[in-house]
Image (cartoon, rainbow, N blue to C red):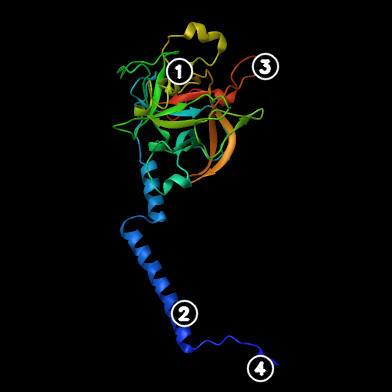
Amino acid sequence: MTSMIPTARYRPVVRIGNWFEDICLEQEKVQAFKSLRDRGQLLVEKTRRLFDNFHKAIELEAPKENVYFGAIVQLMPMKMNICEEHVKAQPALSVIINERVVRHSQNINEECEITIAPSVTPCVRNSFRIVSGDEKDRTNEVIKYGQQFRLECVESQDDMLLLYSAPKSADLKSMIYTTFDSRKWGEINLPLGLCRKSNCGPGKEIPSAYTKWFCTHIEPKKRFESHGAPVPSNTALVITHVPTNKNLAAENVVVQTLFGPEFLVSVQNYKDIYNRERWQNIWMICNGQSEGKR
């Protein structure tokens, strides 16, 4: 009976053929690796190029008493404990890129997202230029409380990348895609994103109003009398989104990114029982001084 059971027998020629096929596959992998290396398409090289582009040093505006149009500044939350006490890096509004985008782009673009990250030194990803919100050149003019402005990425030259947010659509969905989201009372907060200036305006994908912001005094009782007064630098204030009338908010939600653990940021109002903004909505516009006025 045992002689009738078929057994798999391979001749030496078949075994040599299988071995040769494995060798060819390994050679193809090596050739593909060398081709990607020669063209600079390896993921490790893309990641190195990404870090070089995003961490390129930027010189902020010279420290001044007030904030001016055309100045390169950082937006920093006044109160947020990002890590242990011995780490003195102040968090700042920053641009990140996710794993999905890094494979085809290593520069700041419309697919990037916004977070709050520790800022050891000013660089491309955590610095913004303040420009006028009325399409006029107001360079070197003082920004005043209630005056609209825009925030553009410092790396964008020809077609500026502007920071914006957008209200939800009729089906309560956001037009800005983000990898992570934060919530208030179960409802998703409005996220932030980047858009090209050429895509903003009448008949375009994004209304120009979505890119506009203005500053208000931290004390609600002083907002009427301070309206039109110069905005001081490195001082606590509230940054409000024009079309939604909601404030820029630092969320106490930690996420893991390519640059390490960072905090989420949104457009949402957080107020106490006295109708004053809580720590999430309190920011300062830093123009190079090491310590702000607390």
Closer to the observer: label 4 or label 2? 4
Which residue is identified by label 3?
A: 273
> Does residue 55 appear in the picture of this structure?
no
User: Mark 1 belongs to which amino acid?
Assistant: Phe
Q: Amino acid at mark 3?
A: Ile
Q: Quadrant of the N terminus?
A: bottom right
Marks 1 and 4 sit apart, C-alpha to C-alpha, by 90 Å
1 or 2: tag closer to the N-terminus: 2
- Residue shown at the point (45%, 87%) measured from the top left: 13
Q: Which mark is residue 266?
A: none
Q: Amino acid at mark 2?
A: Asn
- Please name the residue that numbered disc 4 is placed on: 3
Which residue is disc 1 drawn over? 214
Find residue 4 and report its horizontal and vertical position in percent.
66, 91
Q: Residue at point 36% right, 49% down?
A: 49
Is 5 displayed left or right of 157 in the figure? right
**Spatial separation of the CA atoms under disc 4 and disc 3:** 91 Å
Residue position marked by numbered label 2 in the rendering = 18
Front of the two marks 3 and 2: 2
How far is disc 3 from disc 1 in space, using C-alphas? 24 Å
Under tag 2, what secondary structure?
A: helix
Mark nearer the viewer, 1 or 4: 4
Q: Nearer the viewer, residue 133 or 173?
A: 173
